[in-house]
Amino acid sequence: MSGVGLSLPDEVLCNRMKKILLIGNYKAGVGGISGQMELLHKHLIACGIESRIFRTSCNIIRRILLFPRLMFIGRHYDIFHVHGCSYWGFFPIVLASIISKMQRKRLIVTYHGGDAQRFFGRFKFFTGYFLSNCQEITVPSGFLKDVFASFGISCKILPNIIENTLPFKERNTIVPNYISMRSLYPLYNISCIIRAFGIVHKSIPEARLTILGDGPERENLERLVSSQNIPNITFVGRVDNKDIYPYLEKNDIFLSAPLIDNMPVSIIEAFSAGLLVISSDVGGIPYVVENRKTGYLFDSNDHMSLAKLMIEAVENQELTRNMIQAALVEAHRYRWENIKNDLFKIYDGKN
């Protein structure tokens, strides 16, 4: 194990561990839960730990067949680490809970997503039963830990992982190039960003907005841009995670306006790459972005306030540069080398 560059405590923990099966609604090359599973799998393999991703995203009929399939594959693994969230995203937890109990496997659940409060409230006994089968539950933010505590469920904070290879770009002058990197679903409220940019462009004609991502709202959003005659907006479409950085490098200000959210990895990636983050203050985001210290926060769905902050970010260059530097320090907390020891202790049952 000395060849993989681990410190002695890591070697000891890795030697005690056996095989880890990562379970979740995984899709290659995308962000969110899939991106976290992909990064975790890569780092575990690099540490010499045998690991595999068990994909649960399929239609309802095929999901029934996942039970015997997990029983067969699961026999070869010692730890089930399942990544789930609310509603259909809870299915991987149900599946892993049942099979791990039958096979007496150690079950770790990492819970993502910002809608847990409402989901647990509607399905309290259902969720409580399956989560009670876990040996350990982790959440990526203090926000979700507080939600779990309100339902009497104990959990630990284990932050999301960001890619260590994202280079930081020093920005001596902040230019009005804005970027959004969320899927085009109503939940992520891209229309709020477009309306705010329409206001900004009247004050700063050279401003540009790049919108990454795809989804069912794309046609409506393009129609909004056309109806309001807003220039300098580019819809890029879906971009694979590995190809994100060139877009971050070309822009200086990252915009996020979700109506519900937990802890978007894209915000941490923006911190790491040296962009200023301006985000709505929903869910777990205030646990990540400290207003006017590591970024700007605005009231949910308030495009007027967002527009003012977009302009202020360009006009108050010194404050923006200071926030970018503070955000870079915050981003280091989410690097693998600062998370792995806590994760290994959870796997090992010694935390």
Image (cartoon, rainbow, N blue to C red):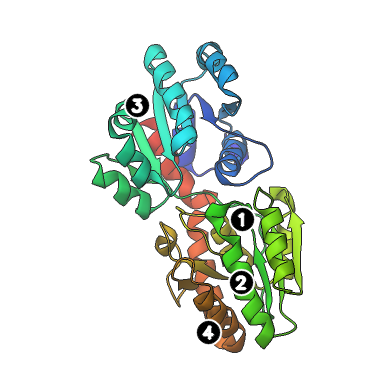
- Amino acid type assigned to the residue bearing label 2 in the image: Arg
Q: Earlier in the sequence, mark 1 or mark 3?
A: 3
Q: Residue at x 54, y 82 (%)?
A: 308
Question: CA–CA distance between discs 1 and 4?
Answer: 26 Å
Q: Decide: few, some or many residues near mark 1? Use Cα within 10 Å; few <14, some 14-19, many ≥20.
A: many
Task: Report how far apart the C-alphas of labels 2 and 4 lie in the structure.
Answer: 25 Å
State the mark number for residue 201.
none
Estimate the x, y position of residue 265 in percent, counting from the top left: 55, 54
Q: Is residue 351 visible?
A: no
- Residue drawn 40% across and 61% down? 287
Which label lies toward us, 4 or 3?
3
For mark 3, what is the residue?
130
Query: Of the residues shown, which amino acid type is indicated by label 3?
Result: Phe
Give the residue at x 42% y 25%: 94
Helix, strand or loop at label 4? It is helix
Specify the label residue 182 is tagged with: 1
Q: Earlier in the sequence, mark 1 or mark 2?
A: 1
Residue 252, picture quadrant: bottom right
Find numbered disc 3 in the image and state the secondary structure of the residue it sits on. helix
Sequence-wise, which precedes: disc 2 or disc 3? Answer: 3
Numbered tag placed on residue 195 in the rendering: 2
Q: Quadrant of residue 55?
A: top right
Viewer-side residue, 273 vs 284: 284
Percent of width and height locating residue 133: 32, 25
Q: Disc 4 designates what residue? A: 319
Q: Secondary structure at mark 1?
A: loop
Q: Report the Cα–Cα distance between label 2 and label 3.
A: 43 Å
* Quadrant, the C terminus: top left
Q: Is residue 248 left or right of residue 81?
A: right
